[in-house]
Image (tube, rainbow, N blue to C red):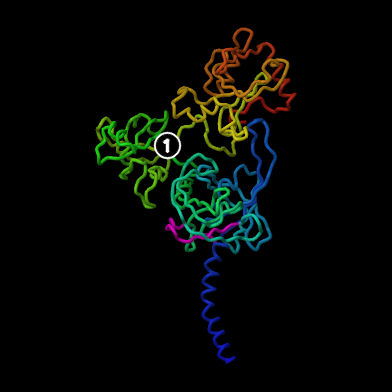
Amino acid sequence: MRIRVLLFFNFFTFCMVPLFSEELQSTRQPRQATVKIIKTYISPDYCIPWKMKDYSSSVGSGVIIKGKLILTNAHVVSDSTILQVKKENDPNTYEADVLYVGHECDLALLKVKDDNFFKNTVSLDLGGIPELKSMVATYGYPMGGERISITEGVVSRIEIGVYSHSKKSALLMIQTDAAINAGNSGGPVIQEGKISGIAFQAIADSNNIGYMIPTPVIKHFLDDIKDGRYDGFPDVGVFTDELLNESYRESFGMRKDQSGVVITHVIKGSSAENVLKKGDVLLSIDGHKIANDGSISYGYGRIRFSIITDEKQVGDKVTLEILRDKTILKKTVSMNNFPIRIPWFNEFETLPRYYIFGGIVFQPLNREFLKCWDKWWLNADRSMLYYYSYLDRDELKPDVNEIIIINHVLPDAVNTYISDIGDMIISKINGKNICSLEDVIEAFKNPKGDFHIIEVEGSYKPILLKASEMYDANIRILKKYEIPYDRYTGSR
């Protein structure tokens, strides 16, 4: 009996060795390609635009791809002053540089300075889009430990969604219930030994709802930078509305067998300007029929028609079939970047632009400045929120390149009666319409008689500064508040 048990145990062990070896091999290469990224970073303070915030540090993950390059998230490396990378079973850290970063798609490419880092590592290839309900494995260095972590999950959704890092665009994303925690960001999501995506965000307080950047977006990024620069994702430059209401469709002269979305605005300076018109109905895009809810039938099921333009590079063309005045037309649009007047997105590696005159701090309105308020979408100045939200959609101030505001006033003898004002939108200075920060600087060169006259929106009473006192006051104020420069306009 003992002999039989021993023989059975040996037979079982012998049979299981290939299974264990196969499982070990399936995880070995992704482990050897997954790296830890340690970032030290410092960000500008848009509330006090001449200062920087305190430095901090964070940890993320990345994956080695061909060419001895590391692919990771943009938010893992944004605003970094130094980047260090580590690999499993190596106590050393290695310095790395950012070669390219695409904040819009939350991707970045790193180069390690010391080639010795790549000893005993492998590079991984990109795979395809995983099937719904198929299994994927997420590799990375999440919080709670020093070793590499591997979690498995099921692909549950493929859709267009907003990328939370920059909040600039809605792009293709894949949802999985594989745990994605702080530190997992930038790590590879693996299926059949290839990269199916890059882990990049999760829903707070959810039960393992995480997202990965799929390979079509990664390939777009890698193809984009082949010419040595990152251009981003182009846009047609229109706002559209669904046509779910039958009466609404009839008002455009649509037949029963026609479907699409209506153009409600064409953005000035966009790809579509002088090609498309308000009231045009988009029927199809590159041969894909658009449904009344704005979706098309595509490889991932029904998905927003913007997937077609998201796959284009800057300079590519897209063919649109439109209904205009009950006539079907075909239009070709050359794709360019969306024109920006108020940056509605988070910015990185960018210093705030400002100008100080008479102690008044002038800045362009953007999302970074609004974030000076706690819960800014509720508590920021209402007029600023209005322009932020509707400047393009409602075609406000078409000749204005950017909205200039007064951040606050640095108290001094020359401005005591206005030292408590702030959060005001400038309309004119010395009779000059203010369309940019540069206009502010130019306007103060030409006072009106003895005074500089600043007109603000929502007030009949202008702000007056005595022109003869400004030269000495500007020098005094900069020294008093330890401000190194009276301006930053984009280069120094």
Residue 80 image position (x, y, % from top left): 63, 44
The picture places residue 95, in percent across and down from the top left corner, at: 65, 51
Name, please, the residue furthest toward the top.
449
Q: Viewer-proximal residue, 18 or 134?
A: 134
Q: Residue furthest right?
A: 480
- Examine the rendered structure and indicate whether residue 72 appears above or below residue 476: below
Q: Is residue 247 magenta?
A: no
Question: Going by the image, does 76 lie left or right of 263?
Answer: right
Q: Residue at x 37, y 51 (%)?
A: 301
Relative to residue 91, is residue 311 depicted above or below?
A: above
Question: In the picture, residue 147 is in which quadrant?
Answer: bottom right
In which quarter of the view is residue 356 placed? top right
Residue positioned 25% across, 39% down in the render:
256
Q: Give left or right: position of 370 versus 237.
A: right
- Residue 12 or 63: which is nearer the viewer? 12
- Residue neighbourhood size for the residue with mark 1, other residues' Cα within 10 Å, grouped as few (<14), some (14–19), many (≥20): many
Would you identify the image quadrant in which residue 53 lies? top right
Describe the element under mark 1 as helix, strand or loop.
loop
Magenta stretch: give its range.
Answer: 122-140
> Which residue, given by chain and number where applicable, does mark 1 sit on?
336
Q: Residue at image x 61%, y 27%?
A: 354
Q: Main secondary structure of the magenta part?
A: loop
Q: Is residue 485 above or below residue 38?
A: above
The magenta stretch spans residue 123: yes
The kind of residue on which mark 1 rests is Asn
Viewer-closest of 73 and 334:
73
Which one is in front, 483 or 344?
A: 344
| Residue 54 place in picture, x, y as percent | 70, 39
Q: Is residue 353 left or right of residue 155?
A: right
